[in-house]
Amino acid sequence: MNDSAADGDAQRDPLSKKLDLKTKLAYGAGDLGPAITANISVFYLLIFFTSVAGIPAGLAGTILMIGKIWDGVNDPLVGFLTDKTNSRRWGRRLPWMFYGAIPFGIFFFLQWIVPQFSANQSENIWPLFWYYVAIGIISQSFYTVVNLPYTAMTPELTQDYDERTSLNSFRFTFSIGGSIFSFILAGIIFSQIPDRKQAYLVLAAICTVISIVGLYWCVFGVRDRILVFEAKRTQMEEPPSLPFGEQLKIVFSNRPFLFVIGIYLFSWLGVQITASIIPYFVVNYMHLKFESDVPIVLIAVQGTALLMLFVWGALSKKFGKKVVYFLGMSLWIIAAGGLFFLKPGQIVLMYVMAVMAGFGVSTAYLIPWSMIPDVIELDELQTGQRREGIFYGFMVLLQKFGLAFGLFLVGISLQVSGFKESVAGSPPPTQPDLALLAIRTAVGPIPTVCLIFGLILTYFYPITREMHAEIMLKLKERRLTNS
């Protein structure tokens, strides 16, 4: 298409105009806060509970599971409500982010306080348990309030098949980049502040401020483009909105969507189990230092994932999303096997495996999130309505279910295997052989099983580039008829 033709299309349909760098950067910044807080929680909150607050591993995993299950339950409801929101000034999604950003930051910070309910540690455990359960539920509620509307904006910003992959590359650049920054920050703070309890508070405070700033950058940076979409959407004749229960039936009758949520569930379950067990693997099995070595290993994984985002994005344009997913997951499966058979002292090989795992983690971030907008367009073609909120609600629900189940599984397996928790300021205890085997199993075989299921579902995923082009052509014809 020549430039004049492209300009003509942009005048007829403003959404056909390519996104500029400023908008892409602002959109990416919206995932900075949720990603930093989520990753700090994934990698450090379980070990914070067991090694700083002195909570047994099984109870610690239960705390995290309760919060994430509640978080998952409210996702479809918040998604449904964002679809119903109608603000001339902000559109459907942005009001939720604007008003939820500050409470989101505050309650994230409160998770890292260790209140002293009793001088006796054994009497202090249950009040601590219920404190963290309550704060976790509130914190996860506000996480949904800011993150669900954010994720639902992707198909509203662009309707181009390949540009959505590019947009998600910017999103996960900020997401993974923020994670890497938080690991570097954690390494610096842990090395400078010997009091582990105080160090976590400082880390949480800095991450809170960055999170709030990133959310407001996104809100104001994408607002103009979102309002263009909203103006066009309100001009279209849509069928009357259906009740929540009826919408759920329609969502789960969308066959490609079932594939996408299955792919994402297994991918993210593998990510979360690996992420939560890495600190235990590095410290208790490889006998390395928590303060210095854990952040470096995490940076090796996430740094590779960050660098590969745009490589995978380019390969996806050439070979398709399925091929890229298969390549990344295959490398991760090899890495998981290598970590399981690794011996203490094989430090260089550990880093090689961490880098290989990062190749797969990158595709777990990128590919499922690039598939979901295509599913939403198919739903619009079939029903005449756009319901991004409820579709993304179930995607985020599964992300959190994967996290909740993964953390619970790791916590219970550690407790059953005899893992010995510690309290801040005391030397780390020697772990029994069964606990070390549980740690190795959680870093190798369990994620591998999850990834294999994801590969099977990806193989049968039905929406190809050609099918999506046909969907968009039919939608364009319908819109021209209705305009």
Image (tube, grey):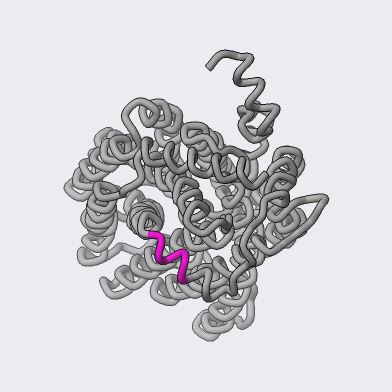
| Residue 368 left/right relative to 424 | left
Which residue is nearer to you in this view: 23 or 12?
Answer: 12
Q: Residue at x 64, y 28 (%)?
A: 17
Q: How many marks?
A: 0
User: Is 65 situated above or below 384?
Assistant: below
Name the spot of residue 301 as percent of width and height, x first. 39, 39
Residue 109 painted magenta: no
| Residue 258 left/right relative to 17 | left
Seen as rendered, the residue at the extreme left is 341
Seen as rendered, the residue at the extreme bottom is 123
Name the spot of residue 143 as percent of width and height, x first. 62, 60
Name the spot of residue 260 as percent of width and height, x first. 38, 54
Name the spot of residue 15 as percent of width and height, x first. 64, 35
Residue stretch in magenta:
249-254
Q: Is residue 426 in view from this perspective?
A: no
Q: Residue at x 27, y 53 (%)?
A: 457
Which residue is nearer to you in this view: 169 or 376?
Answer: 376
Which residue is nearer to you in this view: 247 or 318?
Answer: 247
Q: Is residue 215 in view from this perspective?
A: yes
Judged by its main secondary structure, the magenta piece is helix
| Residue 214 left/right relative to 388 | right
Seen as rendered, the residue at the extreme front is 481
Q: Residue at x 59, y 66 (%)?
A: 140
Image quadrant for the C terminus?
top right
User: Is 193 situated above or below 436?
Assistant: above
